[in-house]
C-alpha cells in the first residue's frame, strides 16, 4: 500500500506507506474521528400513516412466508417422488426436490426480507456509541442496560404493533413444520429409509436375464480377460442408460471391480464368499461406504485395502471386505458376478443387503 492520509495539519498526520508511521514516541497517531452521518428522518418517523403502511408491508411479507411454508408441506405430500420437470439451463430435475427447494427458499427469504424492512422502516435508527470498559459493569450500569433493552423493545413497537407480532410469530412458528414433517415422514422412519437403500438398479438382474457390468462413465461392457490382476474398474449396471434419475441411481449402484490372485484371498472361512461370489479372482463390491456413504475409491494394490477418503475407514479385499480400521461398522456389500456366453462380466442378482450408511442398524 502506498497511501497518504492527512487530517488537520496541526494535529493528526498518518502515513500508511510501507508500514512506516510518523508521530510522537514512534507510535502511530490516530485518524481523526469522521463522526456519524447526519440522521435522516424516514416517512414512518413523522407520519402515523407511513408507519401503518410499513407495518402492513412487513406483515404481508411474513404472511407470504407462511403461505410458502404451507405450500412446502402440500408439495411434500402431493408431488410424486419420481416425477421430473425440465428446467431451462439445467435440464431434467426431480420435481419434488425443486418444489421443496423453491418453497423453503421463498419462506426463508420472506422472513428475512420482512425483518429487514421492519428494521429499516419502523425500528429506531439513531446510532448509539458506547465506549468499551471492563467486562463486568457495576449494578447501576447493568440496571441501566436492562432499561435500554426494555426501552428498545418498546421503541420497536412490538406491543403497539400486534399485527407484526402475530404475523412474525406465525411465520417463524410455521417455518419449523417442514422439518418436523420430513423427520416424521421419512428420516425418522428407519423402514422408509432402509427401503430406499435396499433397492438399486442391479435388482433387475436375474439368473435368467443377468445384467452386464459397464464401465463408468463410458458405458462399455467389461470382459473378464480385460480385468488384470491389480487393476480396478469403476462399474455401473448397463440399465443406467435408461434411468430417469441418473444421479440418484448412480449413487446407489456404483461398484468397484478388482482382480486378485486367488492365492491372495485369506484362507479358511474368511474370504470364501469373496471367491464364490466372484469369478476367477475378480470381485465386485458396492463403492458406497457403510459409514456415511462417501465413495470408497482408493485401492492399495500392495495391501489389497480399500480406503474411504472421508473418515479413513479401511476395508480388506482379501477378507470379504471386512472393516479393519475406521468408523464403518459393516463390510461393503458384495455383488455376485459371473460371465455370459461372450465372456462379458454379468451380475445374476442384485445386492443381497442394503448399500451405503448403516445408521438403520443402530
Ligand atoms: S464415509 Fe467412509 S469412513 Fe466415513
Image (spheres, rainbow, N blue to C red):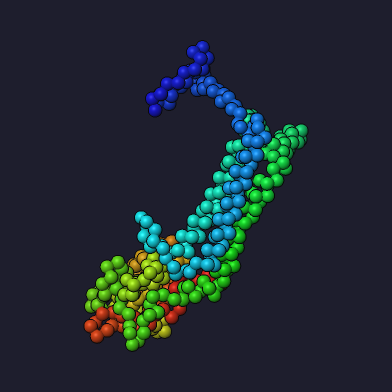
Q: Nearer the viewer, residue 54 or 115?
A: 54
Q: Nearer the viewer, residue 28 or 343?
A: 343
On-image quarter of the N terminus? top left
Looking at the image, residue 133 lies above or below residue 344: above
Residue 249, percent across and down? 40, 70
Q: Residue at x 23, y 75 (%)?
A: 226
On-image quarter of the C terminus? bottom right
Residue 230 is left or right of residue 45, and the answer is left
Looking at the image, residue 67 lies above or below residue 326: above
Residue 66, percent across and down? 60, 54
Q: Residue at x 27, y 84 (%)?
A: 340
Residue furthest to the front in view is 49
Q: Residue at x 62, y 52 (%)?
A: 171
Looking at the image, residue 46 lies above or below residue 195: above
Q: Residue at x 54, y 67 (%)?
A: 77
One can see residue 308 in this view? no
Instruction: State the count of labels.
Output: 0
Residue 101, percent across and down? 49, 57
Displayed quadrant of residue 232 = bottom left
Amino acid at each position: 500500500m502506498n497511501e497518504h492520509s492527512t487530517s488537520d495539519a496541526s494535529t493528526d498526520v498518518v502515513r500508511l506507506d510501507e508500514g512506516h508511521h510518523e508521530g510522537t514516541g514512534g507510535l502511530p497517531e490516530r485518524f481523526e474521528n469522521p463522526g456519524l452521518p447526519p440522521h435522516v428522518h424516514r416517512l414512518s418517523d413523522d407520519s402515523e400513516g407511513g408507519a401503518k403502511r410499513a407495518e402492513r408491508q412487513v406483515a404481508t411479507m411474513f404472511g407470504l412466508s407462511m403461505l410458502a411454508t404451507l405450500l412446502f408441506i402440500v408439495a411434500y405430500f402431493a408431488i410424486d417422488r419420481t416425477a421430473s420437470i425440465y428446467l431451462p439451463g439445467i435440464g431434467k430435475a426431480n420435481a419434488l426436490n425443486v418444489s421443496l427447494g423453491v418453497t423453503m427458499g421463498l419462506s426463508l427469504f420472506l422472513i428475512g426480507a420482512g425483518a429487514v424492512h421492519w428494521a429499516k422502516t419502523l425500528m429506531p435508527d439513531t446510532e448509539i456509541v458506547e465506549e468499551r470498559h471492563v467486562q463486568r459493569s457495576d449494578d447501576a450500569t447493568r440496571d441501566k442496560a436492562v432499561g435500554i433493552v426494555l426501552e428498545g423493545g418498546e421503541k420497536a413497537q412490538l406491543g403497539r404493533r400486534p399485527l407484526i407480532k402475530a404475523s412474525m410469530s406465525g411465520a417463524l412458528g410455521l417455518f419449523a413444520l417442514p422439518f418436523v414433517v420430513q423427520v416424521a415422514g421419512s428420516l425418522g422412519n428407519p423402514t422408509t429409509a432402509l427401503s430406499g437403500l435396499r433397492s438399486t438398479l442391479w435388482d433387475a438382474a436375474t439368473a435368467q436375464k443377468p445384467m452386464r457390468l459397464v464401465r463408468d462413465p463410458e458405458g462399455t461392457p467389461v470382459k473378464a480377460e480385460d480385468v488384470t490382476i491389480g487393476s480396478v474398474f469403476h462399474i455401473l449396471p448397463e440399465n443406467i442408460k435408461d434411468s430417469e434419475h441418473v444421479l440418484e441411481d448412480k449413487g446407489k449402484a456404483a461398484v468397484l471391480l478388482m482382480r486378485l490372485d486367488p492365492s491372495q484371498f485369506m484362507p479358511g472361512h474368511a474370504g470364501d464368499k469373496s471367491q464364490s461370489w466372484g469369478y476367477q479372482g475378480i470381485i465386485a463390491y458396492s463403492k458406497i461406504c457403510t459409514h456415511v456413504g462417501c465413495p470408497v475409491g482408493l485401492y492399495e494394490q500392495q495391501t489389497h485395502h480399500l480406503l474411504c477418503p472421508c473418515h479413513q475407514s479401511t476395508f480388506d479385499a482379501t477378507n470379504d471386505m471386512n472393516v479393519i480400521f475406521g468408523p464403518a461398522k459393516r463390510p461393503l456389500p458384495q455383488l455376485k458376478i459371473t460371465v455370459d456366453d461372450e465372456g462379458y462380466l454379468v451380475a445374476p442378482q442384485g445386492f443381497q443387503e442394503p448399500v451405503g450408511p448403516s445408521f438403520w442398524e443402530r
